[in-house]
Image (cartoon, rainbow, N blue to C red):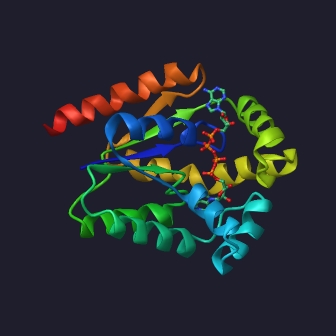
Amino acid sequence: MVNIILFGPPGSGKGTQSANLIKKYGLIHLSTGDLLRSEIEAQTPLGLEAKKFMDAGQLVPDEVVIGMISSKLDANPDTRGFIFDGFPRTTAQAEALDKLLTLKKTSISAVLSLEVPEDELIKRLLNRGLTSGRSDDANEDVVKARIVEYHNKTAPVADHYAKYGKFRKIKGSGTIDEIFGLLSKEIDDLVVERV
Ligand code: B4P
């Protein structure tokens, strides 16, 4: 299996690039942001609880997102691999993911980190907020809170995977196609290594 984590701050393009990568490589897309937004839309108890954190620009508690990912892994036993988008976002989530994958006799192949300057992140998210209806993109204070949360809680996840030589930085500014090309090159190398 090829299991990729698309990593990077809010607005770095994880969701945008995942949508194209799953088509090219036939992988399953697991986005905790999308899963949480579906729960909110369906007004489930989990969604209503998660919304409070998301609207404040904070991370949703680890046990909620780990439980969601665990059931999605169980639901897709025969896939060629997964693209994890927006997960793991804390070291506790990374450790839980490693354990879940070990139980399935697989592991993370690489962590591809989209590097984008902070002013561009803010511009992209506020721009999306004009049309997406996403309340967490509509307000500059919330967007900035998400970036602070990223630096405090998510950036350390990079060290977790760098220890195993799995962390790679990718230039995340430029056109969507240019960035897709850089990501594809990394994934092609992994696919070749596994043949
Ligand atoms: P997510 O849904 O994961 O979203 P994101 O970080 O905002 O964005 P992403 O990096 O995917 O950016 P995108 O491609 O969409 O998280 C939302 C919230 O959910 C979090 O704040 C948190 O509360 C909660 N959550 C999710 N996962 C969690 C977890 N594991 N643990 C705890 N809480 C969790 O791109 C953004 C914009 O940029 C788009 O408008 C796009 O069109 C544009 N764009 C993309 N690439 C571009 C490019 N190259 N040039 C110009 N614009 C570009």
| 164 up-or-down from 11: above or below | below
Instruction: Please tell me in which quadrant of the rendered image residue 63 appears.
Output: bottom right
Left or right of residue 43: residue 70:
left
What is the x, y in percent for residue 92?
Answer: 49, 67
For residue 5, side relative to residue 176 (left or right):
left
Picture residue at 28% right of the left edge, 29% below the top? 188
In the image, 99: left or right of 10?
Answer: left
Residue 11 position in % (x across, y down)? 66, 40
Q: If the image is split into quadrants, where does the C terminus sit?
A: top left
Q: Quadrant of residue 192?
A: top left
Which residue lies at the image location 79% right of the left edge and 49% below the top edge? 133
| Ligand 1 positioned in quadrant | top right
Quick check: 69 above or below 181?
Answer: below
Residue extending farthest to the front is 42
Marks counted in the figure total 0
In the rendered image, residue 163, in percent from the top left (x then y), is placed at 36, 49
Front residue of 52 and 111: 52
Residue 2: give x, y in percent of width and height.
28, 46
Q: Residue placed at 56% from the left, 73% from the top?
A: 64
40 versus 159 height, above or below = below
Q: Residue furthest bottom?
A: 45
Side (left or right) of 67 relative to 135: left
Residue at the far left: name it.
195
Residue at image coords 53%, 52%? 156
Q: Nearer the viewer, residue 105 or 118?
A: 105
